[in-house]
Image (tube, rainbow, N blue to C red):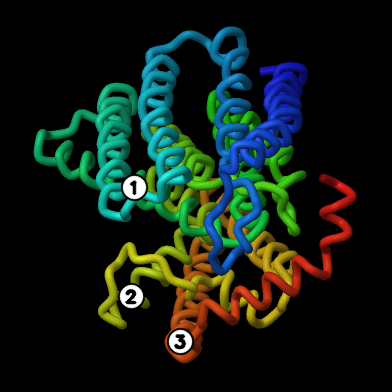
Amino acid sequence: MSIMQLIISFVVPFIVSLAMTPMVRDMALKWKIREKPNGRNNGDIAHIGGVAIVTSIMIGLVPVFLFFVPRHPVSIVFLSILIVSGFTIFLLGVIDDLRSLHYRYKLLLQIIASIFVSVGGSMLLGHFSGFHLAMFIRIIVFFVVTLWVFTITTSFNLIDGIDGLAGGIAVVASLAFAAAGLILYQPMIVFVSVVILGSSLAFLRYNFPPARIFMGDSGSLFLGILFGLISLLLLIPGEDLLFRIAGSIFILTIPLLDTTLAFSRRLINRRPLFEADLGHMHHLLLIRFKSMRKVDFTLWGLSVLFSILGLLTMMGYLAAFFTALFLEIALFAFSLTIMMRVKISKGTIEGIVEQYRSKNSSISSREN
């Protein structure tokens, strides 16, 4: 693994994403493929940015797997899983972006994609981690991996609620996982993470508030399943499993915490778990700050903090583990308490977003 290889792995998806995102945006506006009016926007912003993200990542991975990563059963299986599950989840996202699938159908397809990843992931863990597991344990591992991949995918989908938030968290998470790959001597994780970093950073150029395009479900679901796969790759060596699992959870704290809070809130209120609402962490912060940029920087900052603690945890520092765990519990308890007290209406969020976009319309016009 050389510096030049890392530069190529970053630059290729960055350039493709930077060039392709405005093209996808113009195409969507021409064909009137726009986000439906909701609490996030007034209905005139393209929302299929995931096409640019997925395309740039797949193109960026070509030199990685052809020239940079040694041919090994792990890389072959990983690429196979990525292509099949990635295509499935991307197709689901595109259909949902265009037709707004009922959450039950969307849930079913997410589960199918997660099961496929789990089959491949369980096979990787069983054959290459050095562990010889009994059938009963393998079944447990299969269900745990399925739940993990499904949770990560859902979490990234749910955190994509305001301009730039999911893209920025993807940048932070990919940086953290690249660092983890370097620290733990796993080159494939480094390369894949750097490719995601290049694509996400370029997309953020157009998705930063006020956004000119959204990544949509096609982008957020694909990024979610990618991070699920990367976190599984960290376990392949079969060493320090608890530290590596905990570290991955800490790196992805913000989307995972927001999803846990959403499900907890809906359970308490006896609402369907997968029914959309406006009670997420970013909605609460939006009411507090009245600025999407301030919300982004706040949650990005927390993501950086937890990513650092996650990396230290992977390195075996117990102090980092207990610090991160304490902060997660405290943040969960505090946020859930506020969520149960504050009632957020669609009109309130729409008013804040409309006012923010009006103030920043001159910026958007100059950059369109």
Residue 78 sits in quarter: top left
User: Where residue 21 sits in the image (x, y, percent)?
Assistant: 69, 35
Residue at 68% across, 69% down: 295
Report crowding for label 1: few under 14, some 14 to 19, many 20 or more residues within 10 A (C-alpha): many
Q: Is residue 101 left or right of residue 337?
A: left
Residue at 75% across, 32% down: 18
Name the image quarter holding the C terminus: top right
Q: CA distance from mark 3 to mark 1?
A: 26 Å
Residue at 53% across, 61% down: 254
Q: Which mark is residue 266?
A: 2
Which is closer to the viewer, label 2 or label 1? 2
Which residue bears the numbered disc 3? 337
User: Where residue 242 sits in the image (x, y, percent)?
Assistant: 38, 49
Q: Is residue 100 visible?
A: yes
Determine whether the residue tagged by mark 3 lies in a helix, strand or loop.
Answer: helix
Which residue bears the numbered disc 1? 150
Name the residue furthest bottom: 341
Is there CB contact under 8 Å for labels 2 and 1?
Answer: no
Residue 225 versus residue 164 in the image, above or below: above
> Looking at the picture, which amino acid does disc 1 mark?
Phe
> Looking at the picture, which amino acid does disc 2 mark?
Arg
Report crowding for label 3: few under 14, some 14 to 19, many 20 or more residues within 10 A (C-alpha): few
Residue 136 versus residue 285 in the image, above or below: above
Report crowding for label 2: few under 14, some 14 to 19, many 20 or more residues within 10 A (C-alpha): some
Residue 326 versus residue 88 in the image, above or below: below
Reading the chain from its start, which is encountered first: label 3 or label 1?
1
Pick the front one: 228 or 53:
53
Q: CA distance from mark 3 to mark 2?
A: 13 Å
Which is closer to the viewer, label 3 or label 2? 2
Q: Is residue 236 left or right of residue 107?
A: right
> Looking at the picture, which amino acid does disc 3 mark?
Thr
